[in-house]
Image: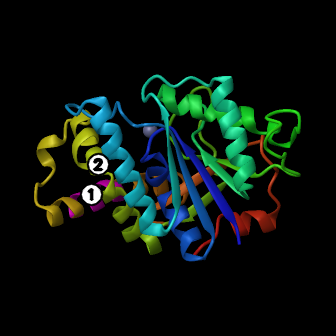
């Protein structure tokens, strides 16, 4: 049984970028644990932080429940994340306690400072998870997990490299069901930031089919760029700071349905 651990900056990041791969792992009986390092309290145009953090925690729990994953939403302030030593220690302790086979996170080259901070935290935790004198209260791992990053379209200083691709068509409905739980984001904040607020239907069935098209367009763009032949896909770049995966690791960690 494989164990997958994701570190996102915000409560919906893992679902957006790896929801398909996570759904496939869950369907195969593998365990999935999600961590949002921030409380998500910046992501709304009108809801104040405290209220929004509560709402997003409930959304994150509902989304994780769709695939039977466990989830933690930490209390770092959304929009102000820094890769501190305290957070590095918490990331190290979390990786050690779960002993994942695969860690997924953001790439270091990303538009959002919180995403970059999480990428840095995970990169800084790699190797240290095997050093017993670092975070002595949690036993060091004998070997590094494989670490992979979500796909993106940023090109500076280096474009994303697709080392693994996942055809998410067989689990696309599950991905949409997970994202549908993040209503404050997918129906309110993200359309607001994209100038699409007027396009989102109010009726719950109609808005879900709007979400399907929205998610399908992004997953289609990823497929076109990195997984030709797939209609909808996710892609992942293997980090050189985690364990170098064997062919067997790649088949087990990036399975197809
Ligand atoms: Zn995010």
Q: Is mark 1 within 8 Å of ligand 1?
A: no
Residue 52, quarter of the rendered image: top left
Q: Is residue 54 visible?
A: yes
x and y, in percent, of residue 175 in the image = 41, 63
Which residue is located at x 81 percent, y 36 percent?
128
Structural crowding at the residue carrying mark 1, measured as other residues with C-alpha within 10 Å and reported as few (<14), some (14–19) or many (≥20): many
Q: Is residue 107 above or below residue 218?
A: above
Query: Range of the magenta residues?
Result: 209-216
**With 61 as the anchor, is 83 left or right in this view?**
right
x and y, in percent, of residue 4 in the image = 64, 59
x and y, in percent, of residue 15 in the image = 45, 54
**With 242 as the anchor, is 106 left or right in this view?**
left
Residue 212 belongs to the span the image colors magenta: yes
Which residue is located at x 60 percent, y 73 percent?
256
Please identify the dominant SS of the magenta region. Answer: helix
Camera-side residue: 239 or 23? 23
**With 133 as the anchor, is 2 left or right in this view?**
left
Q: Secondary structure at mark 1?
A: helix
Q: Are marks 1 and 2 in contact (CB under 8 Å)?
A: yes
């Amino acid at each position: 049984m494989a164990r997958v651990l994701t570190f996102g900056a915000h409560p919906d990041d893992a679902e957006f970028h790896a929801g398909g791969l996570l759904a496939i792992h869950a369907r195969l009986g593998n365990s999935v644990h999600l961590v949002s390092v921030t409380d998500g309290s910046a992501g709304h145009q009108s809801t104040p932080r405290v209220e929004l953090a509560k709402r997003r925690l409930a959304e994150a729990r509902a989304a994780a429940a769709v695939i039977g994953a466990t989830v933690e939403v930490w209390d770092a302030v959304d929009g102000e994340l820094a890769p501190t030593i305290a957070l590095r220690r918490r990331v190290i302790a979390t990786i050690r306690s779960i002993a994942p086979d695969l860690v997924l996170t953001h790439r270091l080259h990303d538009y959002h400072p919180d995403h970059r901070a999480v990428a840095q935290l995970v990169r800084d935790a790699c190797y240290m998870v095997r050093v017993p004198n670092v975070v002595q209260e949690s036993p060091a791992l004998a070997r590094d997990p494989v670490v992979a990053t979500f796909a993106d379209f940023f090109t500076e200083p280096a474009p994303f490299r697709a080392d693994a691709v996942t055809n998410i068509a067989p689990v696309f409905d599950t991905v949409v069901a997970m994202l549908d739980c993040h209503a404050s984001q997918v129906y309110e904040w993200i359309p607001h930031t994209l100038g699409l607020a007027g396009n989102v239907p109010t009726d719950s069935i109609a808005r879900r089919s709007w979400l399907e098209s929205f998610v399908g367009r992004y997953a289609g763009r990823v497929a076109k760029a990195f997984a030709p032949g797939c209609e909808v896909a996710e892609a992942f770049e293997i980090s050189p700071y985690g364990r170098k995966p064997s062919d067997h690791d790649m088949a087990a960690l990036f399975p197809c349905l």
